[in-house]
Image (spheres, helix red, strand yellow):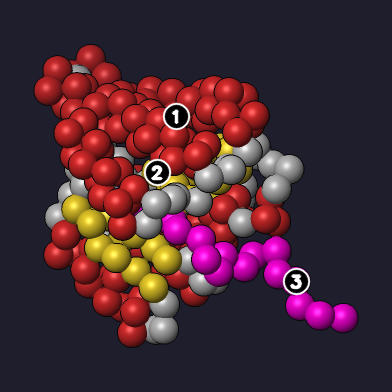
Amino acid sequence: MSKTQLFDLDGKIAFVSGASRGIGEAIAKLLAQQGAHVIVSSRKVDGCQHVADAIIADGGKATAVACHIGEMEQITQVFAGIREQFGRLDILVNNAATNPQFCNVLDTDLGAFQKTVDVNIRGYFFMSVEAGKLMRENGGGSIINVASINGVSPGIFQGIYSVTKAAVINMTKVFAKECAQFGIRCNALLPGLTDTRFASALVKNDAILKTALQQIPLKRVADPSEMAGAVLYLASDASSYTTGVSLNVDGGFLS
């Protein structure tokens, strides 16, 4: 009995935003290990180049590209570049996100509100639109939105972030329904508490961490690599009949 080819991404072009560290880095490296040419992206190219170099050193294929998804002009420019260099895109992982404020919802700053909406909603939306247009031209593809358990159960002092992640879950269903006819699938990953710099306000605070672990049946924080396998499933032919789904990878928190 031969090994399955369900997770083989040979010949696929994948774009991962927020890939210079944390969950995005883990996703980029795993997709490359499975054969994809990964476009490693975040706001600053230096961190992306470091990840791309590591992928290439491991025998994979990668390109580093700077893109701030909160800036519409940069989204337009990066997809013009993808079209010119590759002529196609098979996998989009919307992972870049922002959470600039940790406070009671009544103390929400307008600037922080706007920044969070611009990146987490508008950024994901128009990245998906541009990727979807390329995918439609080439017979299909897979869009994966990294949302959050906060989109289902709001995180304390993470009001507007939680609101945007709820929007991402609904956005995923919108693209799934309207793009299925083009062979495009769209699914969401809902990470639980993960040991990243992004989540350091939670992970590094002993009191908050202790409270959080009491609500997680597996009683531990996730490693970023534990999110990547779920994305590989959603990116590959293993999930060919899966679209519009929100996959919880949260140690049982939402169960």
Residue 58 visible? The answer is yes
State the mark number for residue 4. Answer: 3
60 horizontally vs 174: left or right: left
Q: Label 3 near label 1: C-beta < 8 Å?
A: no
Looking at the picture, how far across and down is residue 33, in whole percent?
A: 49, 74
Tell which circle, 3 or 2, labels the residue nearer the N-terminal end: 3
Determine the main secondary structure of the stretch shown in magenta: loop
Closer to the camera, 157 or 132? 132
- Residue at image point 51% right, 71% down: 35
| Alpha carbons under labels 3 and 2: distance apart | 27 Å
Say which of marks 1 and 2 sits in front.
Answer: 2
Q: Label 2 near label 1: C-beta < 8 Å?
A: yes
Residue 220 visible? The answer is no
Say which of marks 1 and 3 sits in front.
Answer: 3
Q: Is residue 76 above or below residue 44?
A: above
Q: Within 10 Å of the Cα at label 3, are there few (<14), some (14-19), or many (20+) other Cα atoms? A: few
Q: Which amino acid lies under the numbered mark 1 shown in the image of this protein? A: Val
State the mark number for residue 168. Answer: 1
Q: Which residues are magenta?
A: 1-19
State the mark number for residue 247. Answer: none
